[in-house]
């Protein structure tokens, strides 16, 4: 890409020696192009996503495409990023191509750090062609991938290491049936944790495009809610947490019922896990125009505002110690986000420390809603 841009800019110098060449005027007047030279080179440059700047011998900008202006490289007739201006001067002074990788802090609010790959090539007459690629997103994806691999390794290493130690302890205590029973119970718990982690990783990979999504069908929300409550009932009963539901009934959405059950189950599991004994978790369903809102509200410990921005990231846990105690790997809400996104909806959270949390899933309504009564709202819990 850089070579193409530099070549196009060199062509620009030949085709456009002045403010406008005869060939450009001919094309603008409607004359049919007879040669490739008739196509203005700067028009091609304006269409490219890579920033392109042409600087003359007096360090004045002769040409800058939209990407260069959008990235804040050029203002008026000057290159305003000092590192890039130095790169241009070095290319002119040495008469050699100069390259650099830059990390630039915008310094404003909200803070934004740009990663750039720049190349400056000297041309005839002291002009320099500068091309800059915005590498911010690719670097972010690379960082996420690196962190993902590191997190997966760490999360898997923990239960595997525990299983190894417990197996050695069970062998050492083989003459003590009670100790063996204790170690085997712990091994079973760690094996279940490892199995759950692997299954969540497979689910997340599938949701992120690893496999084709199942065909959408009309899904009754009542069935999704009942199945999710049934899955969470045993843990909730053990903590004397009451799960109640309210809102509209007979509502239908379009999508995959197993995936929607998984998403709502993850929200319920979190609500139960982070709530104190003897509290209540409520699920409400409401029609809002052409959308269906499913809300899960708990009376738990709540989430700080800074953490709310990151809780849907993979492996992010507000309280790592408590997550380890509950067996969580920090993938549940990431799975929820991808399931809801794949269904054309979005998930949001409201929370305050000490006041509980409310997660709201908004999905496009499905089915024939003309047959629904105007007022089908049940008593909210």
Image (cartoon, rainbow, N blue to C red):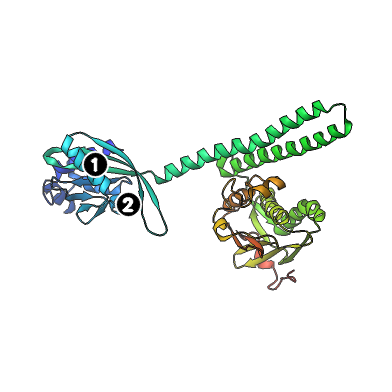
Foreground residue among 238 and 381: 238
Asked whether, in this view, residue 161 is left or right of residue 72, the answer is: right
Q: Residue at x 12, y 52 (%)?
A: 19
**Sooner in the amino-acid sequence: mark 2 or mark 1:** 2
Distance in Å between CA atoms under marks 2 and 1: 17 Å
Q: Quadrant of the C terminus?
A: bottom right
**Residue linked to disc 1:** 87
Q: Give the number of the mark in front: 2 or 1.
A: 1
Q: Which residue is mark 2?
A: 71
Residue 122 seen anywhere in this rendered image of the structure: no
Quadrant of the rendering where the N terminus is positioned: top left
Q: Residue at x 61, y 67 (%)?
A: 288
335 up-or-down from 221: above or below: above
Q: Secondary structure at mark 1?
A: helix
Q: Position of residue 84 (x, y in %)?
A: 26, 45
User: Looking at the image, is 152 positioned above or below residue 21?
Assistant: above
Judging depth in this view, the residue of 368 and 242 nearest the camera is 242
Q: Quadrant of residue 172?
A: top right
């Amino acid at each position: 890409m850089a070579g193409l841009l530099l070549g196009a800019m060199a062509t620009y110098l030949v085709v456009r020696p002045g403010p406008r060449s005869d060939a450009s005027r001919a094309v603008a007047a409607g004359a049919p192009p007879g040669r490739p030279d008739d196509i203005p080179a700067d028009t091609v440059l304006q269409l490219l996503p890579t920033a392109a700047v042409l600087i003359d011998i007096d360090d004045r900008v002769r040409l800058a495409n939209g990407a260069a202006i959008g990235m804040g490289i050029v203002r008026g007739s000057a290159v305003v990023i000092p590192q890039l201006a130095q790169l241009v001067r070095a290319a002119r002074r040495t008469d050699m191509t100069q390259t650099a990788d830059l990390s630039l802090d915008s310094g404003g609010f909200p803070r934004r750090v740009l990663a750039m790959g720049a190349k400056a090539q000297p041309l005839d007459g002291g002009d320099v062609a500068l091309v800059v690629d915005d590498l911010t997103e690719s670097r972010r994806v690379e960082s996420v991938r690196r962190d993902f691999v590191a997190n997966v390794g760490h999360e898997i290493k923990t239960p595997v290491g525990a299983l190894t130690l417990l197996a050695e302890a069970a062998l050492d205590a083989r003459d003590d049936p009670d100790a063996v029973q204790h170690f085997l119970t712990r091994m079973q718990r760690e094996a279940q944790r490892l199995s759950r982690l692997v299954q969540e990783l497979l689910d997340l990979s599938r949701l992120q495009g690893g496999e084709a999504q199942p065909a959408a069908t009309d899904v009754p929300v009542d069935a999704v809610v009942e199945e999710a409550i049934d899955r969470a009932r045993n843990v909730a009963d053990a903590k004397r947490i009451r799960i109640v539901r309210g809102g509209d009934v007979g509502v239908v959405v379009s999508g995959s019922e197993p995936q929607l059950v998984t998403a709502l189950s993850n929200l319920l599991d979190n609500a139960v896990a982070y709530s104190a004994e003897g509290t209540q978790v409520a699920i409400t369903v409401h029609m809002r125009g052409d959308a269906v809102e499913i809300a899960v509200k708990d009376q738990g410990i709540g989430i700080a505002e800074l953490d709310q921005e990151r809780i849907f990231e993979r492996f992010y846990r507000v309280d790592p110690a408590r997550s380890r105690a509950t067996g969580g790997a920090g993938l549940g809400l990431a799975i929820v986000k991808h399931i809801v996104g794949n269904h054309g909806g979005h998930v949001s959270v409201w929370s305050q420390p000490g006041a509980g949390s409310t997660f709201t899933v908004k999905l496009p309504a499905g089915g024939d809603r003309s047959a629904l009564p105007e007022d089908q709202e049940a008593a909210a819990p």
